[in-house]
Image (cartoon, helix red, strand yellow):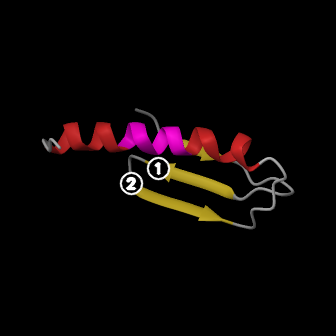
Amino acid sequence: MESLRIKKGDTTPKLDFDLDKMEFSLEGESRSEDVLTFYEPIIKWLDNFKEWFFQKIGVSI
């Protein structure tokens, strides 16, 4: 699992999900006309993170 970083665009926010520091930040405005294209990979990353993190700490649901 790798950290997720997305640079700020004209209509999209800066995103930094740093796994080494376990810090998650999202800053800026989100005015993208194609919201799905921007947020779908982030949502998939978060789903994968949840599974990775639960395995790391030994939680099963």
Residue beneath label 1, please? 18
The dominant secondary structure in magenta is helix
User: Picture quarter containing residue 28?
Assistant: bottom right
Q: Residue at x 38, y 41 (%)?
A: 49
Q: Residue at x 75, y 62 (%)?
A: 30
Tell whether position 32 is magenta. no
- 39 or 5: nearer the viewer: 39
Tell whether position 48 is magenta. yes
Could you say whether the residue bearing mark 1 is in a helix, strand or loop?
Answer: strand
Please state the extent of the stretch shown in magenta in the rendering.
Answer: 43-49
Q: Answer whether labels 2 and 1 touch (C-beta < 8 Å).
A: yes
Q: CA distance from mark 2 to mark 1?
A: 6 Å
Q: Residue at x 17, y 44 (%)?
A: 61
Q: Residue at x 49, y 39 (%)?
A: 45
Could you say whether the residue bearing mark 2 is in a helix, strand or loop?
Answer: loop
Name the kind of residue labelled 2 in the image: Lys
The tag on residue 21 is 2
Name the kind of residue labelled 1 in the image: Asp
Q: Is 25 drawn above or below residue 61 in the view shown?
A: below
